Image (spheres, rainbow, N blue to C red):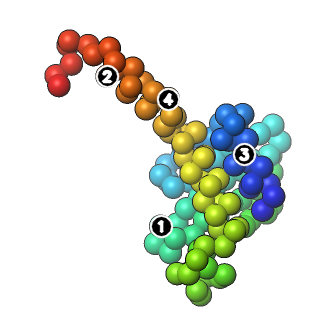
Amino acid sequence: MELAAKAADRTLAGTMNWKETDDPDLFLYAGSRTSLAIDYYPMDKHYEFRVLNDRGTVVERFSRWPGPDENAPWIEPTPEYLTLQRLHDAARRSALRIDDIIEQAFLDLDHPDDGLPF
């Protein structure tokens, strides 16, 4: 879980860039010899963090539900769950460039283009 926490910190600091995938809840980071994936499963509200080698093989996997295990998912979230949630949120913001888009929206509102239909 230490790797997930460090990845979240680096992502929030802007030094890790994540990519979108065909799955709207899965985000990937590609390093020089390893990749990371963070996925969210909304049906049962759990996160999965995967470490992949340079061939794309999953070498480590961490899954966390909000509760102590998958059989008790509806109680107060565990610290590990909150770490994966934080990483997923940061990876999503990075991959979708949410902060850039919001900043551009503010700029557009401050300097409206008369040609816009609204």
Q: Amino acid at mark 3?
A: Asp
Nearest to the eye among marks 4 and 2: give it. 2
Mark 2 surroundings within 10 Å by alpha-carbon count, few (fewer than 14), some (14 through 19), many (20 or more): few
Residue on which disc 3 sits: 9
Which label is found at residue 42? Answer: 1
As helix, strand or loop, the secondary structure at mark 1 comes to loop
Q: Amino acid at mark 4?
A: Asp
- Circle nearer the N terminus (3, 1): 3
The answer to whether the residues at label 1 and label 4 have Cβ atoms under 8 Å apart is no
- Circle nearer the N terminus (1, 4): 1
Residue on which disc 2 sits: 109
As helix, strand or loop, the secondary structure at mark 4 comes to helix
Give the residue at x 54% y 42%: 93
State left or right for residue 117 relative to residue 7: left
Give the residue at x 16% y 22%: 117
Nearer to the camera, 46 or 19: 46
Mark 4 surroundings within 10 Å by alpha-carbon count, few (fewer than 14), some (14 through 19), many (20 or more): few
Q: Whole-percent x and y of residue 101?
A: 44, 30
CA distance for labels 4 and 2:
14 Å
- Circle nearer the N terminus (3, 2): 3
Q: Whole-percent x and y of residue 6?
A: 77, 49
The answer to whether the residues at label 3 and label 4 have Cβ atoms under 8 Å apart is no
CA distance for labels 1 and 2:
34 Å
Q: Is residue 65 above or below residue 88?
A: below
CA distance for labels 1 and 4:
26 Å
Is residue 85 in sight in this rendering? Answer: yes
Nearer to the camera, 107 or 48: 107
Q: Amino acid at mark 2?
A: Leu
CA distance for labels 3 and 2:
31 Å
Nearer to the camera, 33 or 38: 38
